[in-house]
Amino acid sequence: MAIVVASAAGIFLLAPRLAQLAPWLPRALYLADAGLALAGFVWLALIGLSYVTDRALLPGRFAERGLLLKTLRLASRVGQMFGVQRDWTDSAAIAVYNRLAWAREWRVRANELLILIPRCLSRTALDGVMDIAKRYDVATFVATRGAYARQVIRERRPKAVVAVACERDMVSGLHDVAGRLPVLGLTMQLPNGPCKDASLDLVKMEEFVRKYLR
């Protein structure tokens, strides 16, 4: 919407110059801008309906594996401009992403699924994740940083990933990876601050793992 408004303002300011080039040009640009606004409205409406109905109403490249990924970081920046905490906007974006990703019927074998976890998990949380991984015979990797996690994905070539991270790292990871393969992202609770003794919803973790397994 901000792009549409900015474009309309630019056309208005430049209209006299544009009319000198061709009398019909300002009107054509206004119509194109209106078309862009309509397309954006329809896209948001379909994303909203997909979220509410838990159905995949758009192809992945136009939803959680494409256009939505491109807006994740933008949503954080826009939220900060209006004084909204980044963790809140990131958490909301991840919730929408996961809801849309959950609606897809992706199925892989246990040896094609990879669980990625950070090193800051508490011992209880880590033991819980390892127990789930052992029960379903799924490989688990402790990623010390985001770049290393992406390297592991390139080397192991999984067909689906269940990832655990804080909101900021999750948005970054989804932006870089989710367009290439299915990902479900689980955010952590941080009772003692960042990067220390993090916990997570182990029930949700098991649901994510079972979602992908045949």
Image (cartoon, helix red, strand yellow):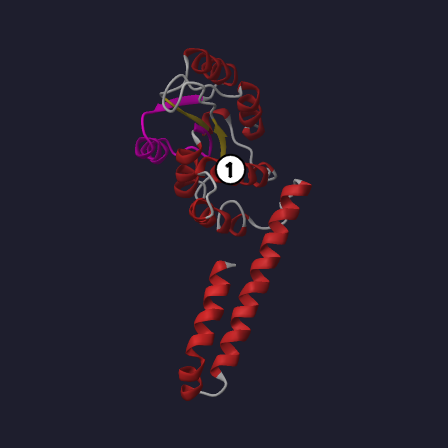
Q: Is residue 159 magenta?
A: yes
Image position of 151 (left or right of 5): left
Q: Which residue is mark 1?
A: 94
Q: Amino acid at mark 1?
A: Ile
The residue under the point 43% across, 75% down is 13
Crowding at label 1, few (<14), some or many (≥20) Cα neighbours within 10 Å?
A: many
Q: Between 146 and 198, which is closer to the camera in this rendering?
A: 198
Which residue extends farthest right? 53
Secondary element at image label 1: helix
Q: Is residue 85 left or right of residue 212?
A: left
For image coordinates 61% across by 39% down, the residue present is 103
> Is 88 on the left or on the right of 147, as rendered?
right
Of residues 40 and 108, the one drawn nearer to the viewer in this rendering: 40
The answer to which quarter of the image holds residue 31 is: bottom right
Q: Quadrant of residue 140?
A: top left
Range of residues picked out in magenta = 139-165
Where residue 9 appears, x then y in whole percent?
A: 47, 70
| Residue furthest to the front | 83
Q: Which part of the image, by quadrant, shows the C terminus?
A: top right
Residue 64, position as x, y percentages in the image = 52, 45
Q: Residue at x 52, y 14 (%)?
A: 135
Residue 205: % across, % down? 53, 23
In the image, residue 137 lies in the stretch drawn in magenta: no
Looking at the image, which is closer to me, 14 or 208? Answer: 14
The front one of 114 and 63 is 63
Q: Position of residue 15 (x, y in %)?
A: 45, 80
Q: Vertical placement of 156 versus 37: above or below?
A: above
